Amino acid sequence: MLTIGIIGCGKIAQVRHIPEYLAHDEAQVVAFYDKTPERAQAMAAKYGGQAYDSLQALLENDAIDAVSVCVANHMHAEVTMAALRAGKHVLCEKPMATTFADCQAMVNLAESTGKKLVIGHNQLLTPAHRRAKELIEQGLIGEILTFRSTFGHGGPETWSIDPGPGTWFFNKEAAVLGAMADLGVHKTYLLRYLIGQKFVEATAKFATLHKRDTSNELIKVEDNALCIYRMENGVMGTMTASWTYYGAEDNSTVLYGTKGIMRIYDDPRYSMVITLNSGESIYFNLESIQTNESQTKSGVIDAFIETILEDKETELSGRNALDSMEAVFAAFESAEQNRSVRIGK
């Protein structure tokens, strides 16, 4: 039985991490910390365990085996590394960190301490994405040539304990990046997983088109990001992240191969549709992908517990996330400098 501490008791902790730990036979949540003490106290009162007044006090408890890091983006690296130094396994929410140097430092520290570092890239675990990976490896759509992947919804205003334009997602100091860090990291990591190739170039445009803060000023992070990625085998395509899709959420990925087209979460009726050159269409009715309004089990907690108890590698490890995070920061650099940026140079 693993004993778990929750660091950051906001929305993601309350709707995903805590419930999924509680549903697991090998986990017990015993500790809570939040910069707003009342939140940690409320979680402890509701679920049992202890609310801590400081992060240091929680990490000094040797009885805690592992922690979930659910704080704002700018604190991911600092809190994760403090937990690793304290001998805890760490599940860190995405984005992994706000600089590539911090991402590398987190991985190096995890490996030097012998502790597991897992990043919450839940899209890899959805049924359609898992099945798509299998079919791609079997060669069903042939060699992938191009792609487009989109993650867009109406914004993170409701995905916060303090909903509205005052959400930390809109605060550049706390979030550092906007839609790219919130949504684009998911799709970047997914493309790396599905295509099985490293990124070698990013060309990106970031813009703030509509979102406003509590002063009715445009927010200082991007609400839209458009990236062109090129992979090491020449495959290229687009990745779009948006907080201004004011309608149905778009969480689709389309892969164009030499033998056909694979559409994942792109059809309202089927989770995956494959159209082959022969004219044959294959339909898959698998579990729908999560949305902000419809939460289902992510599988991330299961993967985290499994990698600890069985001392095995996971696709969600910090080491496996490095290629994708390098691409994310290359896209950020491209948007800032208005030029294409080589990755892994």
Image (cartoon, helix red, strand yellow):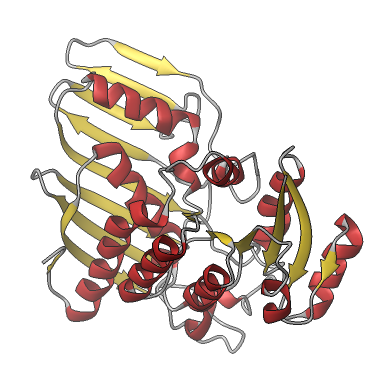
Q: Position of residue 56 (x, y in %)?
A: 67, 80
- Among all residues in the image, which is located at the extreme right? 45
Q: Which of 108 and 150 is in front in this view?
A: 108
Left or right placement of residue 318 versus residue 322 in this view: right
State which quadrant residue 184 falls in.
Answer: bottom left
Q: Where is residue 117 in the image (x, y as percent from the top left)?
A: 48, 57
Q: Nearer the viewer, residue 97 or 261?
A: 97
State which quadrant residue 43 falls in.
Answer: bottom right
Q: Which of 143 and 306 is in front in this view?
A: 306
Q: In this view, does 281 lie above or below 21?
A: above
User: Which residue does the image show at 44% across and 19% down from the upper left?
Assistant: 284
Left or right placement of residue 331 versus residue 55 in this view: left
Left or right placement of residue 195 versus residue 167 in this view: left
Q: Position of residue 250 (x, y in %)?
A: 45, 46
Quadrant holding the C terminus: bottom left
Q: Position of residue 201 (x, y in %)?
A: 14, 60
Q: Is residue 194 above or below residue 345?
A: above
- Among all residues in the image, which is located at the extreme left? 234
Left or right placement of residue 104 versus residue 85 in this view: left
Q: Nearer the viewer, residue 256 or 34?
A: 34
User: Which residue does the image show at 36% across and 66% down from the upper left?
Assistant: 108
Quadrant holding the N terminus: top right
Give the mark count.
Answer: 0
